[in-house]
Image: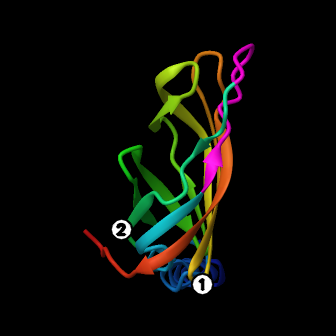
């Protein structure tokens, strides 16, 4: 390897390392989500051939704790505990996680999360949730309002 190419490689590796360490490639932000929140919103059961009223989750307590700089654990009342990956102001639920809902006209059901995104702005988080179970595709949007600061890196 020529000395010019070697110098370029060293600069590239150092630059990449500095970019990653300084957050130049995104990620981080778990601290923005940490706290105790109150949820306002509902989940629509979306069951084929089985009409069902929305599941009102307004008033549920949601506790969010960071597990590291880029991950949070969300405890949604007694419904579920889900891990999210954080990138700035957006948190996305990881694959193969579940929640339990009592779906009207169906009964208690463990639903597989297909998408759950949280977007924080100050003391408010917008929630967008979709899932699936048997003949139902429960989904809904809601808002979380910060109550207190809580949680930390475990």
CB-based contact (under 8 Å), mark 1 and mark 2: no
Residue 122: give its label: 1
* x 59%, y 16%: residue: 134
Q: Which residue is mark 2?
A: 65
Q: Judge whether 63 appears above or below 44 on screen.
A: below
Can you say which quadrant of the picture contains the N terminus? bottom right
* x 51%, y 47%: residue: 94
Residue 37 percent across, percent down from the top left: 46, 70
Q: Quick one: SS at disc 2?
A: strand
Residue 70 percent across, percent down from the top left: 46, 68
Q: Is residue 15 visible?
A: yes
Residue 75: give its label: none
- Asked whether 63 or 67 is in front, the reply is 63
* x 35%, y 46%: residue: 78
Does the magenta stretch mainly form a helix, a strand or a loop?
Answer: loop
Quadrant in the rendering for residue 25 = bottom right
């Amino acid at each position: 390897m020529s000395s010019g190419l070697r110098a370029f490689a060293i600069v590239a590796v150092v630059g990449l390392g500095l970019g990653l360490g300084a957050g130049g490639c995104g990620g981080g932000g778990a601290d923005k989500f940490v706290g105790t929140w109150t949820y306002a919103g509902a989940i629509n059961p979306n069951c084929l051939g089985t009409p069902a009223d929305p599941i009102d989750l307004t008033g549920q307590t949601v506790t969010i704790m960071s597990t590291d700089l880029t991950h949070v654990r969300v405890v949604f009342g007694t419904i579920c505990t889900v891990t999210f990956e954080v990138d700035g102001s957006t948190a996305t639920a990881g694959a193969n996680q579940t929640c339990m809902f009592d779906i009207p006209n169906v009964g208690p059901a463990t639903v597989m999360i297909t998408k759950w995104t949280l977007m924080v702005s100050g003391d408010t988080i917008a929630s967008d949730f979709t899932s699936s179970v048997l003949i139902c595709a429960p989904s809904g949007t809601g808002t979380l309002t910060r109550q207190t600061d809580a949680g930390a890196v475990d």
